[in-house]
């Protein structure tokens, strides 16, 4: 059993619940932090922060942990969603606290308490609050945009990225899907495997290849009738592509500290018809067999 340090007392209950869940998953699998880092592609330092409640684990890390431990990624995501909302609220409160403290310090400067100077201080205070108000407005717009996006996907499950929405004939579409699975066959093309319920215990690694320090893989879900590419142990600038016939989808490592990336899915009748390739920022290239 792993020995964990106490979670911070001030941690939001929903964030605490999520961190404790991740700890239980690691404990049940009997994995050390080094093994978790090696198998998921996220660093040991990152996992220490995720499991200690100092940083919210990103979706890619959660999906990778689910895959290496045989846990349902949908179950983990169900707990992560409210934790993410609580984390965002906490970050916003911190921003406001910083802004308020700046206003207090500005008003405490000698000579700021006269009638005329008070008005000037109020104006500075208003300016100090603008970043927080602007951030709140941006968050609100993003929430609405994401909601509209998800609603559109729910109404039009056959939509494909960069296409007119016409189904691809490369794989059949199932009419009876398991709980949590939102697409099959052509309806999966261009979609995110995690969001459509095709990952977790429904996915296998069909083939893999080592490219420099990275590993590129073809991931395949028979239930969804689709394949996608994954790259692990990667660095920013590394690119992974999945290729089925003349169709390809791309994923890229963009964030600092990220070491794993996925492509959108492509409908395919079997894993042997898909190939994954990596182009590293160092110039190294390679593909799966």
Image (tube, grey):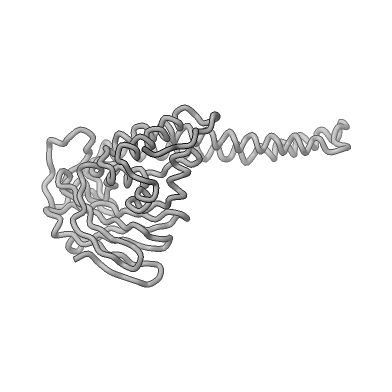
Q: Position of residue 191 (x, y in %)?
A: 27, 48
Front-most of 239 and 288? 288
Give the residue furthest to the bottom: 283
Rendered residue at 60%/38% (across/down): 95
The quadrant in which residue 184 appears is top left
The quadrant in which residue 241 appears is bottom left
Image vertical order of residue 253 relative to residue 135, above or below = below
Q: Is residue 188 visible?
A: yes
Q: Is residue 247 visible?
A: no
Image vertical order of residue 109 relative to residue 260, above or below = above
With 263 as the anchor, is 171 left or right in this view? Answer: left
- Quarter occupied by the C terminus: bottom left
Give the residue furthest to the top: 13
Rendered residue at 58%/33% (across/down): 93
Rendered residue at 36%/58% (across/down): 233
Q: Position of residue 79 (x, y in %)?
A: 37, 32
Q: Position of residue 15 (x, y in %)?
A: 45, 32
Rendered residue at 48%/36% (across/down): 5
Front-most of 127 and 71? 71
């Amino acid at each position: 059993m792993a020995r964990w340090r106490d979670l911070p007392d001030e941690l939001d209950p929903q964030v605490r619940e999520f961190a404790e869940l991740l700890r239980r998953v690691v404990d049940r699998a009997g994995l050390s932090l080094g093994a978790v880092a090696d198998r998921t592609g996220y660093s040991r330092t990152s996992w220490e922060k995720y499991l200690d409640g100092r940083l919210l684990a990103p979706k890619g890390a959660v999906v990778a942990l689910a895959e290496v431990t045989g846990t349902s990624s949908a179950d983990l995501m169900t707990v992560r969603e409210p934790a993410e909302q609580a984390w965002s609220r906490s970050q916003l409160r911190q921003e406001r606290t910083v802004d308020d403290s700046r206003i207090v310090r500005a008003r405490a400067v000698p000579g700021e308490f006269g009638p005329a100077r008070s008005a000037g201080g109020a104006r500075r205070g208003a300016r100090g609050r603008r970043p927080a108000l602007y951030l709140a407005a941006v968050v609100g717009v993003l929430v609405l945009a994401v909601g509209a996006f998800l609603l559109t996907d729910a109404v039009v499950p056959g939509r494909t990225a960069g296409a007119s929405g016409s189904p691809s004939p490369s794989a059949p579409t199932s009419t009876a899907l398991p709980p949590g699975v939102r697409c099959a066959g052509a309806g999966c093309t261009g979609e995110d495997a995690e969001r459509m319920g095709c990952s977790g215990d429904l996915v296998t690694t069909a083939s893999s290849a080592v490219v420099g320090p990275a590993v590129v893989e073809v991931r395949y879900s028979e239930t969804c009738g689709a394949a996608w590419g994954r790259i692990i142990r990667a660095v920013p600038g590394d690119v992974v592509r999945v290729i089925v016939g003349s169709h390809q989808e791309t994923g890229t490592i963009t964030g600092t500290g990220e070491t794993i990336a996925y492509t959108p899915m492509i409908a395919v009748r079997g894993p042997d018809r898909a190939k994954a390739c990596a182009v590293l920022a160092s110039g190294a290239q390679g593909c799966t067999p």
